[in-house]
Image (cartoon, rainbow, N blue to C red):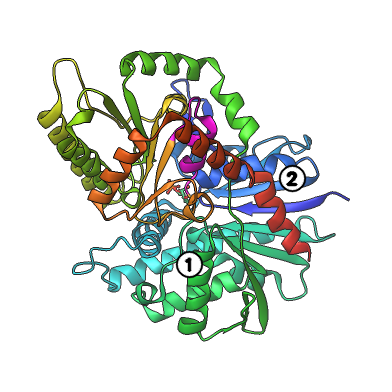
Amino acid sequence: MRQRVLVASNRGPVSYQVGADGTLVGRRGGGGLVAGMTSGLAAVAAQADVTWICAALSDGDRVAARSLDAPVGDPEDPGEVRVRMLDIPPETFDRAYNNVANSILWFTHHMLFDTPNQPQFGFEFRRDWDSYLAYNQAFADALAHEAAADPAGRIRVLVQDYHLSLVPRLLREKLGAAADVGIAHFSHTPWAPLDYYRMLPRQVGQALLDGILAADHVGFHAQCWADAFLDCCAQFLGAEVSPAGRVIHAGHVTEVAVHPLGVDVPELRARAQEDDVRAHVSALSQAADSRRLIVRVDRTELSKNIVRGLAAYRELLATRPQWHGRVVHLAFAYPSRSAVPQYRAYIDQMAGIAGQISEEFRTPDWNPLVLEVKDDYARSLAACTLADVLLVNPIRDGMNLVAQEGPVLSERGCALVLSREAGAAATLGDDALLVNPYDVSETAEALHQALSMPDSERRRRSDALAATAAACPPARWLGDQLASLDR
Ligand code: G6P
């Protein structure tokens, strides 16, 4: 009998827009979670029936969720993943996603609060929290419905990220103790240190931990995030934590483990050979005109630390004039979460420092900085293939795929300037130039070193980074989690 795997995440593998003629046009969903899960599921879907439950995000998604009223995708095709979109009432969704998940939980785990002013947990937050609960309940109900549709055999459920922290608990309550279901929860983000986590209202902090701990297996990309989570379980919740990373809470044992997510190297390299990418490679290398390239590719995201990255580039140019005319910084910062006011303000800050760099250093025949905010995946891949230096300097990051994809794509070897606070630093640290993301001068110095190192060293480091990224392909990342649920 074929096995069943259920995936739950806020953002799904496909997103719909209503075309001019009223038809729905599907596009692949974005972000690291979706990319890793989609790639990982390709192998799983050949042997198991996979259903992916996600929220309807766009107007087109809502139309799709209502009008199709059936899973998207062909359930008869074993390679297919069925997608079920949840049409959650817009106000509930907005409060759960924007106000709680993005404005509180993301900020907590990435330590982004401007603490003299934020957070403030008043009555509006309590109202938003009720919506977060309702939104999690909608996912738990949908998962339970799917599980009930096929009562024979064990079902494995993979719940993703901070949006759905309450789902393991709510699903267990819904299914009852007798159900043969294995639940895993995976956090693609960091986990906040105890002192920061303690800012959350007690009941909220406890509910999040209790919700996740109803899973059998809990995963993180890096040991430091797993350790922070275990610390919160012990100190905030009062759960029993064993040195081996097992948590006993409410009579249930949860295994906490680390599953770093790397890159599907053959798939990525094949994509980079396609015509659209090659056209961008030609255009970008022509524009660079043999100058060195420092590349970054991010969502416009506070945690990605783009403004300090630009400040470091400005400092490089201000303090090491030997690079004038010899280097170009391609900074791609694609729009993200524009419903959150801090993200809109951040775009202005980025533009401000970019303008300053141009004003101070631009000459008639040298443009030192290209800041692009229009999303173009093919152009991003092209920039990575050409980069001499890749700058990845997040304040905190669960893993960071760009730090791994860059070296995999690099054609002549690229040096990686990497924040020590990215989960990827745990695996890539030996071959990257690690920086404190708050230290702009140190980052400028690392950029200088990266530009100055002999080509042979850049090549050696790049090859070693690519080999590390290749060691944890998405199929393995997912396979290990599923295997843990079967133990
Ligand atoms: C990235 C993060 C994930 C997060 C996702 C959500 O992929 O690594 O942890 O779930 O972004 O982004 P969104 O654009 O859907 O808010």
Part of the protein shown in magenta: 400-414
Residue type at mark 1: give it: Leu
**What residue does disc 1 label?**
133
Residues at marks 1 and 2, CA–CA distance in whole angstroms: 30 Å
In this rendering, is residue 234 above or below 77?
A: below
Q: Quadrant of the image for the C terminus?
A: bottom right
In this rendering, is residue 236 above or below 294?
A: below
Instruction: Count the numbered circles shown.
Output: 2
- Disc 2 packing (10 Å; few <14; some 14–19; many ≥20): many
Q: Position of residue 456 (x, y in %)?
A: 47, 31
- Disc 1 packing (10 Å; few <14; some 14–19; many ≥20): some
Q: Earlier in the sequence, mark 1 or mark 2?
A: 2
Q: Residue furthest left?
A: 360
Q: Nearer the viewer, mark 1 or mark 2?
A: 2
Left/right of residue 486 with respect to residue 171 in the rendered view: right
Is residue 140 at all visible to an observer of this figure? Answer: no
Q: Position of residue 409 (x, y in %)?
A: 52, 30
Q: Position of residue 401 (x, y in %)?
A: 50, 43
Residue in the image at 41% along x and 71% along y: 193
Left/right of residue 47 with respect to residue 165 in the rendered view: right
Residue type at mark 2: give it: Val
Q: Position of residue 99 (x, y in %)?
A: 35, 59
Left/right of residue 212 with respect to residue 175 in the rendered view: left
**What residue does disc 2 label?**
44
In this rendering, is residue 225 above or below 363?
A: below
Query: Under tag 1, what secondary structure?
Result: helix
